[in-house]
């Protein structure tokens, strides 16, 4: 309804009230209250201008038809009082009505924006990579909020994603500056809103929207949503890469295991044949056969280490735990390595009444062997090696100590890494660099830990723990 029609309608309403009361035997007070109610209704429905016109017409009608002397328009004081009351009612009611309508409109606008945000969240639940997600997000913002255009600046790749040519209102300079802002900035002259996109305190970029614009709170909510969407896409990508890397590592470990197994079989045959020939070979050929035997034996040990490392990495160490006498394991390892330890003073110290360890005897024997071989390889010939075992805090603590040059502090955290070898011995000592990694994998498969303590010039002490086997009560 146009303003002219509303003004005419307000005059008709007041005229109708006056004409009705002219037919009834009522006093002027009743007419004034009725006109007041009519003006209150008109101000609430149509506004102040319509109610003001109705107030003037009602005052004139009241004075002319109901206030003595009837039939004359004198506008005595009581008429002015009525006019002021009508106008005050019209002003107050129109303001209250306008405020109520504004709040209702704001509530409706927030409801619509909330629905659009919800639709945006639903649309972005399933996303691909970060780049695809950003393009889809910008298009969705325009579609859901009815903006002319939108743009997003992604700081990680220095890329600007736009929804259309209208987004050129937001220049790349604007977007880069907005990434450093603390809140939403609205440029009403350009019809442009800019908001930083952050995840916590970490800036990810900025979002621009071209009018028509939602509220600043909604724009900030959209910026927060794009930050969460980017982080989700990044996490999914990293999870995919991690899974691919894990599968690749598992495949590589399986290939190494198979290859080492295929190499180990003929090497065993070569060693057996050479050993047989050594017993009956002439003196001139015996040296050559000894070289073949030593080389084949070294290759056989390397193949065994590759197989062990592959199984550690693939998580295929199947433990067959049982109570194990650690002292017997130490003596068995020393007996097996006796040729390698020839000429070295080797000492063992086993605590009295040492409980048995709950472990896989073959795997722990292999870990001990790696530690003893490591001590022999990285300490001077003829230097002492000591082995000890004791009970400590319901664990069995095993130590292997040497009198070598020690390990540099910056290398200790890397000493158990696969293929790592200290800089000082990298080219002086033969080996694959997998022995300590294998020992670490075996100990950790038992749910225990292994570590090293060392000082320059004082040698190194490798220690690991094993769970103590529960004591069986005597009958």
Image (cartoon, rainbow, N blue to C red):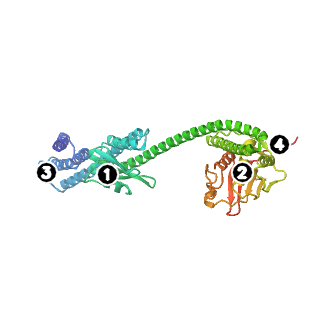
Q: Residue at x 63, y 59 (%)?
A: 424
According to the picture, the residue beneath numbered tag 2 turns out to be 373
Residue at mark 1: 193
**Distance in Å between CA atoms under marks 1 and 3:** 65 Å
Residue 20 against residue 184 in the figure, above or below: above
**Along the polypeptide, which appears first: circle 4 or circle 1?**
1
Earlier along the polypeptide chain: callout 3 or callout 2? 3
The Cα–Cα distance between marks 4 and 1, rounded to whole angstroms, is 76 Å
State the SS at label 1: strand
Q: Cα distance, mark 3 to mark 2?
A: 129 Å
Pick out the residue farthest to the right: 475
Residue farthest along the left direction in this orientation: 72
Pick the residue in front: 43 or 25: 43
Sequence-wise, the earlier of marks 4 and 2 is 2
Tag in front: 4 or 2:
2
Which residue has dot 3 on it?
A: 69
Q: Marks 4 and 3: in contact by CB < 8 Å?
A: no
Crowding near the residue tagged with mark 3, few <14, some 14–19, many ≥20 C-alpha atoms within 10 Å:
few
**Residue at the image point whose x is 31% and y is 43% from the top:** 163
Name the residue at 40% across, 38% down. Answer: 123
- Name the residue that disc number 4 marks: 472
């Amino acid at each position: 309804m146009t303003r002219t029609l509303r003004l005419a309608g307000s005059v008709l309403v007041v005229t109708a009230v006056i004409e009705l009361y002219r037919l009834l035997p009522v006093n002027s007070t009743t007419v004034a209250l009725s006109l007041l109610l009519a003006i209150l209704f008109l101000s609430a429905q149509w506004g102040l201008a319509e109610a003001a016109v109705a107030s003037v017409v009602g005052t004139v009608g009241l004075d002319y038809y109901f206030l003595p002397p009837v039939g004359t328009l004198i506008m005595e004081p009581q008429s002015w009082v009525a006019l002021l009351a009508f106008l005050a009612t019209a002003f107050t009611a129109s303001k209250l009505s306008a405020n109520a309508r504004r709040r209702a409109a704001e509530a409706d606008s927030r409801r619509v924006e909330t629905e659009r945000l919800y639709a945006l969240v639903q649309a972005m639940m399933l996303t691909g990579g970060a780049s695809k997600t950003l393009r889809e997000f910008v298009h969705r913002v325009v579609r859901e909020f009815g903006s002319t255009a939108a743009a997003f600046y992604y700081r990680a790749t220095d890329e600007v994603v736009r929804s259309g040519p209208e987004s050129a209102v937001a220049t790349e300079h604007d977007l880069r500056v907005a990434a450093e802002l603390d809140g939403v900035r609205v440029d009403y002259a350009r019809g442009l809103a800019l908001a930083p996109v952050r995840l916590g305190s970490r800036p990810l970029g900025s979002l621009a929207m071209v009018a028509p614009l939602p509220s600043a709170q909604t724009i900030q909510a959209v910026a927060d949503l794009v930050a969460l969407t980017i982080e989700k896409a990044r996490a999914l990508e990293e999870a995919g890469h991690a899974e691919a890397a894990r599968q690749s590592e598992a495949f590589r470990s399986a290939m190494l295991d198979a290859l080492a197994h295929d190499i180990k079989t003929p090497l065993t045959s070569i060693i057996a044949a050479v050993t047989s020939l050594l017993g009956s070979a002439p003196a001139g050929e015996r040296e050559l056969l000894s070289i073949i035997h030593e080389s084949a034996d070294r290759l056989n040990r390397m193949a065994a280490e590759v197989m062990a490392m592959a199984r550690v990495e693939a998580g295929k160490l199947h433990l067959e735990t049982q109570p194990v006498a650690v002292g017997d394991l130490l003596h068995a390892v020393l007996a097996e390595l006796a040729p390698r330890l020839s000429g070295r003073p080797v000492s063992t110290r086993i605590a009295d009444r040492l409980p048995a360890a709950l472990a896989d005897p073959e795997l722990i024997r292999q870990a001990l062997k790696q530690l003893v071989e490591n001590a022999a390889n990285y300490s001077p010939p003829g230097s002492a090696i000591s082995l000890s075992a004791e009970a400590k805090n319901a664990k069995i603590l095993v130590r292997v100590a040497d009198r070598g040059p020690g390990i540099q502090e910056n290398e200790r955290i890397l000493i158990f890494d696969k293929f790592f070898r200290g800089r000082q011995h990298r080219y002086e000592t033969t080996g694959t660099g997998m022995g300590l990694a294998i020992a670490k994998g075996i100990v950790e498969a038992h749910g225990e830990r292994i570590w090293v303590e060392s000082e320059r010039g004082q040698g190194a002490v490798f220690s690991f723990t094993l769970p103590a086997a529960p004591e069986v009560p005597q009958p």
